[in-house]
Image: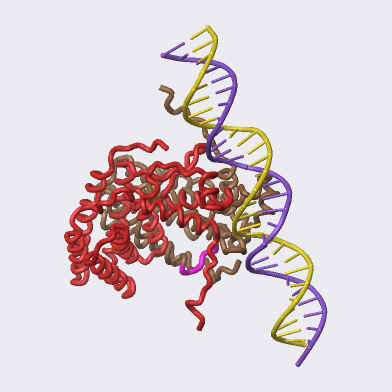
Chain colours: A brown, B red, C yellow, D purple
DNA sequence: CGGGGCTATATTGTCAGACAATCAGACAGT
DNA sequence: ACTGTCTGATTGTCTGACAATATAGCCCCG
């Protein structure tokens, strides 16, 4: 009795961090932009301590970097980051794919659902932010096949990093129809039991994603 | 020139967080113990804001949990946590093992070095904390084979969680000689090119670790 | 004209104090 | 046994303050 009856208690720090995060995702704040404590505090109508804690959250998330005595800035991806992120993605997602059979029905259903949502969304007028969101949810569901919430958390972290790093590119890469087809094919292979084939397809997908990432990002270095 | 010449600029928050973390690792603070802000601030001679930031670090690390409006407490592992952690370990480490051939010489050398250090240490009088430290370093090096710093960071996080959860057990589990032999055999199989065999050996090792973890931890629930 | 060093300013890191909000326990009333 | 209220403890947040540090401008000197 009285289940599903829970009042959400969001702290000011959480709401503040969320709002800044949304701005990063939206590309309102470009990578490299310094996040000044006093300015943010005044702009958002909260105390500096609150802003500091919110910034600490964002840094822990990996979407911002702190340079001691200089401040926090929006994270900028360099080529080494992209390589690292790609390896992390490949490791976690292909581990999930290989566990397809061992996964629970719920976890497998999540993959299908995310795929369906993605294809449905791609058919409509594709708001780029929502589309990448749906896209990342598929990959997140693949990691979910591993059955570890901690790995899911790690996946969320690098997804956020990717989103921020690429937010200023409005043109989501390439052909949407081709993307949809690639994911559909991946899941289809899984459904038919061809796990190894799916893993290979995933590797190809991620490898091509990595090259386009490298192409879009210049060889910038973090300068703050 | 002038490399390895770097004045360590550790902030008070970092030092504070480190000190508390060490206490958690040492088992001075048992799982479930509440970490009161004012008491810690007075005991350590720092301001409450500093303690709050340090606690936020520990929570982000996963070695402590925050309950809104109630405070932060030393993390207590429940059976679900152990299962989740074990899956995360198995996923990351076997992914690393499977990349043995693709890894760099440096990464492979790290595995050997950690193994050597562990066996050497096991021969001497085994200080339990140092021994588990050396042990975890081997497994960390296995994750390092994936070539992703972010995955290494994730591995560090769950290692810390494990250490805190098991700090109050002074008796490190079971037969040390057997443990050493298991790891030595694993690396030997890798050296001889039997990657699949090594992966199986690792799975066995982690599975047996999981059952002993479940055995040592009761079915406690977090109560704060 | 260019470079070294100095000063002024901005920003962070840390502390102290204050107050509302929330929580746990005691206690009384029905 | 259940409810309502009170009280003390603790967290969440804000404000103001100050030292340490980094940045930028400026002046002086060669």
Residue A196 screen position, x and y as percent: 26, 57
Quadrant of the drawing holding the C terminus of chain A: bottom right
B7 left or right of D19 in image:
left
Counting labels gives: 0
Residue at x 21%, y 63% (from the top left corner): B183
Residue B224, percent across and down? 42, 38
Q: Position of residue A28 (x, y in %)?
A: 62, 54
* Image: magenta residue range: A76-80
Q: Is residue B130 visible?
A: yes
Query: Magenta stretch mostly in which secondary structure?
Result: loop
Q: Nearer the viewer, residue B198 or A189?
A: B198
**The quarter of the displayed image where residue B38 is located:** top right
Q: Is residue B70 above or below residue C30?
A: below
Q: Does residue A146 appear in the picture of this structure?
A: no
Q: Quadrant of the N terminus of chain A?
A: top left
Residue ID at (32%, 52%) = B88
């Amino acid at each position: 009795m009285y289940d599903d009856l829970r009042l959400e208690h969001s702290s000011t720090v959480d709401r503040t961090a969320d709002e800044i995060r949304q701005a990063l995702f939206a590309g309102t704040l470009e990578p490299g932009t310094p996040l000044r404590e006093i300015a943010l505090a005044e702009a958002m109508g909260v105390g500096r301590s609150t802003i500091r804690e919110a910034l600490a959250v964002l840094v822990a998330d990996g979407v911002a970097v702190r340079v001691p005595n200089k401040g926090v800035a929006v994270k900028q991806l360099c080529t080494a980051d992209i390589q690292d992120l790609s390896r992390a993605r490949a490791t976690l997602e292909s581990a999930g794919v290989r566990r397809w059979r061992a996964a629970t029905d719920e976890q497998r259903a999540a993959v299908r659902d995310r795929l369906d949502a993605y294809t449905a969304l791609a058919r409509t007028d594709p708001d780029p932010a929502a589309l990448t969101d749906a896209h990342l949810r598929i990959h997140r569901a693949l990691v979910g096949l591993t059955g570890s919430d901690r790995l899911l958390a790690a996946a969320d972290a690098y997804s956020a990093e990717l989103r921020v790093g690429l937010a200023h590119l409005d043109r989501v890469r390439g052909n949407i129809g081709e993307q949809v087809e690639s994911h559909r094919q991946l899941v289809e292979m899984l459904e038919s039991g061809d796990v190894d084939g799916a893993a290979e397809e995933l590797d190809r997908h991620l490898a091509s994603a990595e090259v386009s990432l490298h192409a879009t990002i210049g060889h910038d270095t973090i300068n703050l």
